Image (cartoon, rainbow, N blue to C red):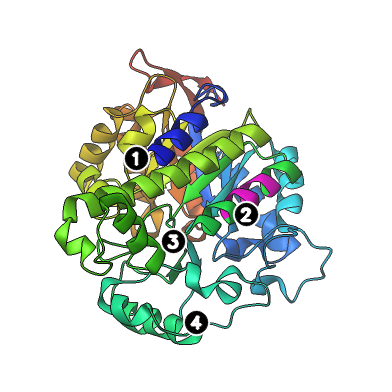
Amino acid sequence: MPPAIALLLASALSGPAAGSSLPSAEMRGLWVVRTALVSPQSVDKVVDDAKEAGFNALFVQVRGRGDAFYDSRLVSRSTLLWQQPDSFDPLKHLLARARVQGLEVHAWVNVLLSAHFGLPLPPGHVVREHPRWIMVPRQVATAALTASPERLLRMVAQSSRTDGDVEGYYLSPAVPEVGAHLESVVRELLQRYPVQGLHLDFIRYPGADFDYSRPALEGLQRLQGQADLLGGPSKFPGAWAEYRRDVLSALAARLVKAARAERPASTVSAAVVPDEVTAVSHKHQNWPGWLADGLLDALCPMTYTADSHIFRAQVEQARTRVQPGQGLWPGIGAYRLTVDGTIEKIRAARASGASGVVVFSHESLAAGDLRRLRQEVFGYVPRASAGGGMGVAVGAR
């Protein structure tokens, strides 16, 4: 690991001890996507529905595509809010409603994914203002070096549309200004809003063919001390993979340090690729290292599979990486399950030693599903087991 990146990582670890603010009860989280934040009425409904189902925490997508669902001086207001008066602050409204209902609120931030392909960008949007900050796929690396900003955006979009893992434009962690911008976003958000947690998502590369932007290639070039800018990745594949993991880990460390400085009692969690090999080698997301280094208070592996055997295996693998005091909150993909399947996965997570779950997402739960979740899995408080997971029920909730 380059010395500068190691220094930043060590600096991030000098903050409050990980896990100090984790809830004593089981985490029963619900991911709330930005479509629920477009009006006061929709905000009220999602909070009340979560309470009805027995959830105790909301993971609220306040930064979806490089935009803001809160009052920001740094980030463009989401175009989804343009029909609302400027006085409407979705996060402020939700925090007030959640406080009444007794629910925690974790600010869910999509870190690198910052814009859809083909949709107009609002004035001041980070990708519109700084197109050269985006990641570049390998197949257009040569042309991207000399392309105009407009052509660069077109090339990246055209070359990526057929890849299902690429959901839009991603900011590059190799660009120094990206880290500074994202740190400012985190600091402003946590300074201004009394959230209980910061939840990092899309803090990963779309795939192994990213990022071939000029800043990334120059980073490897400096590291290896060689002159061949475009040929470096093929000449030094191991160093290239390690470099990308290191710059992403340095960004994670920077954001965690900022969060702990602004709101020391908040819980920092991350949604991660559940298969460790895929995460580390393909997405360059070294979440096992983040846990070992104390960067995260809680891990949310996105265990969205419908296969119960795979689900248990992924949860149990993640549990071997979680340190004492860190939470393990598997993500459950309700969007691809029946309510019976969602209930079964919640029970399987408990049996596998998780300290809670986070369900994706509110849009997938009908009124009858809410009642069944409370009746069958969320109507009581499990006690903590000796192994750090959750055991049998002890009384009514």
Q: Which residues are magenta?
A: 182-188
Q: Earlier in the sequence, mark 4 or mark 3?
A: 4
Q: What residue is shown with label 3?
A: 172
Q: Which label's residue is closer to the chain start, 1 or 2?
A: 2
**Residue of label 1:** 287
Q: Secondary structure at mark 1?
A: helix
For disc 4, the marked residue is: 149
- The percent position of residue 371, horizontal first and vertical second, equals 52, 46
12 versus 128 height, above or below: above
Asked if the stretch drawn in magenta spans residue 347, the answer is: no
Amino acid type, label 4: Pro
Residue marked by disc 2: 46
Report the residue at 33% width, 16% height from top. 387
In the displayed orientation, state which residue is furthest to the top: 386
Mark 1 vs mark 2: in front: 1
Contact check, label 1 and label 3, Cβ < 8 Å? no
Q: Is residue 125 left or right of residue 243?
A: right
In the picture as drawn, the residue positioned furthest to the left comes out as 235
Please, what is the three-letter code of the amino acid marked with disc 2? Val
Tell me how far mark 1 sits from mark 2, CA to CA: 30 Å
**Residue 305 horizontal side relative to residue 82, left or right:** left
What amino acid does circle 1 point to?
Trp
| Element assignment for label 3 | loop
4 vs 1, front mark: 4
Residue at mark 2 to residue at mark 4: CA–CA distance? 40 Å
> Callout 2: few (<14), some (14-19), or many (20+) C-alpha neighbours within 10 Å?
many
Q: Amino acid at mark 3?
A: Ser
